[in-house]
Amino acid sequence: MSEDTRSAMVIGGASGIGFATARVLAAEGYRVVVADVNATGARDAAARLGGEVTAITMDVTDEASVRRGFEAEHGVHTVVNCAGLSVPGAITELELAHWQTTIDVCMTGTFLVLKYAGRHTADGGSITCIASLNGRQPGTGMASYCAAKAGVLMLVEVAALELAERGIRVNAISPGLVDTPLVAGAALVPGLIDEYLENTPLGRSGRPEEIADAVAFLASSRAGWMTGAAIDLNGGAHLRRYPDILGRVAAMARTYENP
Ligand code: NAD
């Protein structure tokens, strides 16, 4: 890829926030590469978006995979990392391997993306990492995810310092509950979504496009003086408290035991 200020790589672009971001950037005239560990999903996403959208396979937990992807797209101007997952569980019960899975994808994956995006993004470009409300707000059952996302926020700040001399801006967006496949399981726990929304001043969950619009802003020259920042994009949920997931799950289990 030659240097082109309207070129973008969206990692985790096969689904949810990443797919919406690829769609919004493509509509704004960016030549978009959708990168995802889900090779079929990335290809399908590119096919659905059409135009100049292409797909590559990238696993953010695999250094060789991340390096290959960025070497192929050297000079890309805008990088967005939306790859993520969460394996929930109480600290006293959480298997080390499950802790590690979330840390690997969300935090180590962000490190690897920043490492190679830092080398291959064009001078003056921008990198945006999707963190989470949970990077600053704790939630029961969310230890690995909260720790990983707090790590993402700090990695973004360090990268912003290190890449500023090349004019590369590095920022984070911290969404609250956004309607995507990632959080579909929350709807299965009685009362959980209601409790979340009661603690959200604007009273609703977010749409993937609302995160994508903020990414488009951060990628643009309108955000040209913005680096090392984190945008709270959550309907005000950071102003209140996170729902008690483990409490809700325990209540659900009691209902099944004593119907
Ligand atoms: P999603 O499950 O719809 O999409 C996540 C994408 O990441 C998928 O396409 C998946 O294949 C990809 N992915 C997973 N592991 C990967 C890996 N190792 N390498 C490359 N790609 C990988 O989820 P989403 O809700 O769109 O989440 C996007 C980001 O937003 C994540 O970082 C998530 O933690 C964050 N986030 C989501 C919410 C929410 O409520 N949906 C809230 C806060 C933060």
Image: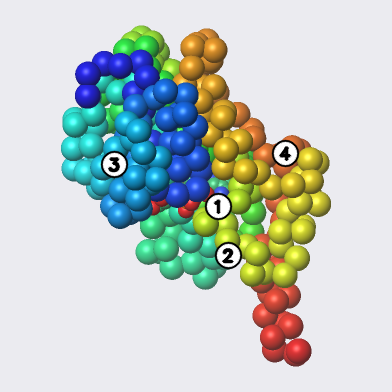
Whole-number angstrom distance, CA of label 2 to CA of label 1: 10 Å
Return the disc, 3 or 2, that comes first in the chain's sequence: 3
Left or right? Give the position of 38 relative to 68: right
The single residue placed furthest to the bottom in the displayed view is 258
Image height of 177 relative to 54, above or below: below
Mark 2 crowdedness (10 Å alpha carbons): few <14, some 14-19, many ≥20: few
Q: Are marks 3 and 2 in contact (CB under 8 Å)?
A: no
Q: Nearer the viewer, mark 1 or mark 3?
A: 3
The single residue placed furthest to the front in the displayed view is 51
Q: Secondary structure at mark 2?
A: helix
- Amino acid type shown at disc 1: Thr
Q: Residue at x 30, y 16 (%)?
A: 4
Image height of 188 relative to 55, above or below: below
Q: Which residue is mark 2?
A: 185
Q: Which residue is mark 3?
A: 55
Q: Quadrant of the N terminus?
A: top left
Q: Which mark is residue 180?
A: 1
Using the rendered image of the protein, determine whether residue 200 is visible from the camera's viewpoint.
yes
